[in-house]
Amino acid sequence: MSELAASGVSNRNHGSNIGTGTIPQGSGAAARVLDAEMNWLAKLLDAAIRLYFGQPCEVDDIARIDAPDLRDETTWYARIVREHITELDERVTLALALAPCLRPQLLDPLFARNPNLERAFSEFGGTARGTHAGFWPTYETAAFVVGATTALERRIRLTRLAEPDHPLRRARILHLEPTESAVNWFDAPLRVDPLALSRITLGVEQRPDYSSTFPARRLTTPLEWDDLVLHSGVRDEIDELRAWIEHSRTLLDTWQLDRHIKPGYRSLFYGPPGTGKTLTASLLGKTTGLDVYRIDLSLVVSKFIGETEKNLAQVFDEAERREWILFFDEADALFGKRTATSSSNDRYANQEVAFLLQRVEDFPGVVILASNLKGNIDDAFARRFQSMIYFPAPGQAERLTLWRNAFSRGPRLAAEVDLEVIAADYEVTGGAIANVLRHAALSTLRRGGETILQADIIEGIRRELRKDGKTP
């Protein structure tokens, strides 16, 4: 079946009596392609059951049942089949993994019980999965459909799907997810990656929802690099990080530097609040096409032993599958210096730090930690950073640019406003300037005016200085 991705022009009717119907997910071409694929899988299941039990069947091998022809289709599923699948067992396995989400009733015949043993047929595979009431196929199910139950050679060949380098797994489409009760690889449930599933069915990417079990939020920004005002030396270091994101595969694969350079990049952004650390992380994702997710430390840190590692592991696993940039704001809370082990709580806290250190070091993508003070970060982490970028408070020239950028839109400035004097007299950060803009604009609206006054800006600055305990 080496030409499977392009074969199957004629779909002959083989008398299937399993799970016909339409696909509720998707629309247009995607639904039509998936509907045809599920109809094909229904025929395969019907034939596999008939052949196994010696019932009348129009074919003597399921390979004789033509797969839908996807050569001229442009859907996500058609692309996956053409680019990552060459053999029958691969396409059957992927179709089975989709069936519980697309047409669960198609698998109902596999609930049949062995009358001789008064239990389910072990050769059908299947497992319970959450609240799903239908039959959830396993790799054992795929083995049954392709005839690997009786042909040992086919069964052994199917094990290649467990290899991390298999195209379907390397492309993060099909997951190998052994359960605690699984005895061997064939007991693992078939699961399609949620991102791949949303692309296959809807043609769009559905991102995970922020929750107590997924403590990460996507960072976005309407701003551009021109809006980020930094010292030239800082910009150079950021450009190096950006170059890694854009060219790491060239370095590791094309130039074969993977013998000396590990995948992944770890950077520490440190400096006073409001100096552009979060904005820089957002812009790196925006300009390179990668999603940036900020870890919510309030949800990650749990009072229950083991929950911190569990929550973080889920985020890291998802980020690796989807090639996210991970951003830890106020990273001192989790990546701070380890304490002396004077109690069991101290020992556990140090175990958390060790776990985080290992996950960060093994992560093949980009991890950015943000902290106000470099000295707060554990020394073991510091040695493993590829870059440590200091974001200083802006100088007078940078402050003037920030003031001009902030007030370039919206209400006009009164003639009395002198931004050059303000930039020279008040040492504030970009974050503080944004807050001053908000205060000044609201003050203008409250008095029914159309221009921002010098007094509005000065009062906003005084409020920001008081936040830091400074005398206006």
Image (cartoon, rainbow, N blue to C red):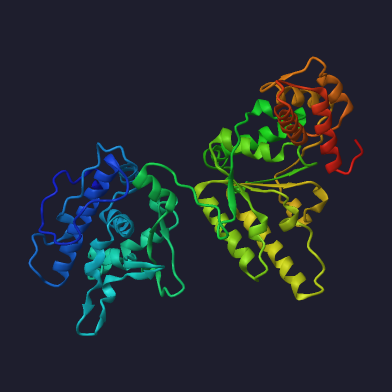
Residue 19 in the image, given as x and y percentages of width and height: 20, 60
> For residue 239, which quarter of the picture?
top right
Left or right relative to 316: residue 160:
left
Residue drawn at (11%, 71%), measured in percent from left and top?
54
Residue drawn at (65%, 28%), measured in percent from left and top?
225
Whether 161 is drawn above or below 69: the answer is below
Task: Work out whether residue 192 or residue 424 is closer to the camera in this orientation and state it.
Answer: 424
> For residue 31, which quarter of the picture?
top left
Whether 347 is drawn above or below 163: the answer is below
Residue 21 in the image, given as x and y percentages of width and height: 20, 54
Left or right relative to 169: residue 258:
right
Residue drawn at (90%, 40%), measured in percent from left and top?
470
Task: Work out whether residue 255 or residue 29 is closer to the camera in this orientation and state it.
Answer: 29
The answer to whether residue 358 is visible is no
Left or right relative to 356: residue 383:
right
The answer to whether residue 422 is visible is yes
Whether 377 is drawn above or below 281: the answer is below
Residue 288 in the image, given as x and y percentages of width and height: 56, 35
Residue furthest to the right in view is: 471
Q: Quadrant of the C terminus?
A: top right
Q: How many marks?
A: 0
> For residue 128, which quarter of the picture?
bottom left
Task: Work out whether residue 150 or residue 34 is closer to the camera in this orientation and state it.
Answer: 34
Residue furthest to the bottom in view is: 117
Residue 159 in the image, given as x and y percentages of width and height: 36, 63
Left or right relative to 78: residue 422:
right
